[in-house]
Image (cartoon, grey):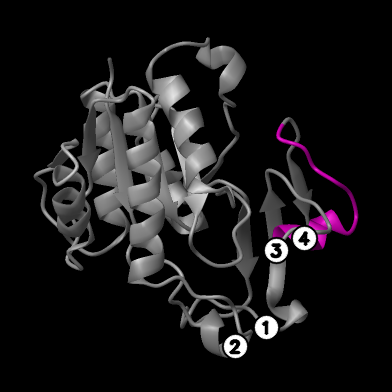
Amino acid sequence: MKAIALAVNPLSGTDIRRFSSYASSSGFSDKLQIALRTLVIAHTLGIEFFFIMPDHSNMADTIADKLSQKGIAVQKHHMPIHSSAKDTTAFAAAMREKECGCLITLGGDGTARAAAKSCGDLPLLPLSTGTNNVYPYLAEGTAAAMAAAAVAQGRYDTGLTCIRDKRIEVSVNGIFVDIALIDAVVSRIRMIGAKAIHQLEDLHCLVVTRCHPASIGFSAIVGCRCIVCPSRVVVFC
């Protein structure tokens, strides 16, 4: 029986879009309830052990304490904490080495991207608690737990139940620096700032792995021209 790993990004749903576009927010208690519900259901379905990514907000400690009261075995993974995407990337790599059955992330597109950098063949189930998400699923924790438990227990062939997604590899002067799961943008703006682009003329080039006119974010721009499924890549300039 393989364990399930959980990475909760306590900072997801707190960026500048709360002020610029009235985006929805996801607080500590919201993430806590989703995490607890997901792991309790997974345990009910046969998963006996869980690993949790540590964080400075004590989210992992709270989850571990509440689940231990129910007799559920949870271990907070020992690792340095930087309160950045590096934590999720390092945690995903560690869970891959431990051969966990599934990695669940609670966060936005950035959280899923950080996990995808190092999770390799470890099945990744990204749940949306961020803003303007395209990659993470907006799914009920109960249903997500059922899927994660089935994959972790090896009841089904992962070649049939899991999707091997595309990724965009970003290089600078021929040197690999990062990846993107949905879109990569080249902007004419020299200052990084909040990494928010408000004027169309500031957009120089956009590369997407998938898009739809009803999605949110830069990929919707290409989605107005065509619908891109996971098997295609489009460059729009």
Contact? badges 3 and 1 (CB < 8 Å): no
How far apart marks 4 and 2 lie (CA) works out to: 18 Å
The magenta stretch spans residue 225 = yes
- Whether tag 4 and tag 1 are in contact, CB under 8 A, the answer is no
Alpha carbon distance from label 1 to label 2: 10 Å
- Tag 1 residue: 198
Relative side of 47 to 110, left or right: left
Q: Residues within 10 Å of mark 2 (few under 14, many from 20)?
A: few
CB atoms of marks 1 and 2 within 8 Å: yes
Kind of residue at badge 3:
Ile
- Furthest-right residue in this view: 225
Q: Element at badge 2?
A: helix
Of 173 and 169, the residue lying toward us: 169
| Residue 27 picture location, percent across and down | 39, 72
What span is colored magenta in the figure? 217-230
Mark drawn on residue 216 = 3
Q: Which of the two discs, 3 and 1, labels the residue nearer the N terminus?
A: 1
Of tags 4 and 1, the one toward the viewer is: 4
Q: Quadrant of the C terminus?
A: bottom right
The reply to whether residue 67 is visible in this rendering is yes
**Rounded to the nearest whole Å, what is the CA distance between mark 3 and mark 1?**
14 Å
Residue 201: x percent and y percent? 76, 80
Instruction: Give the labeled residue for mark 2.
Output: 20
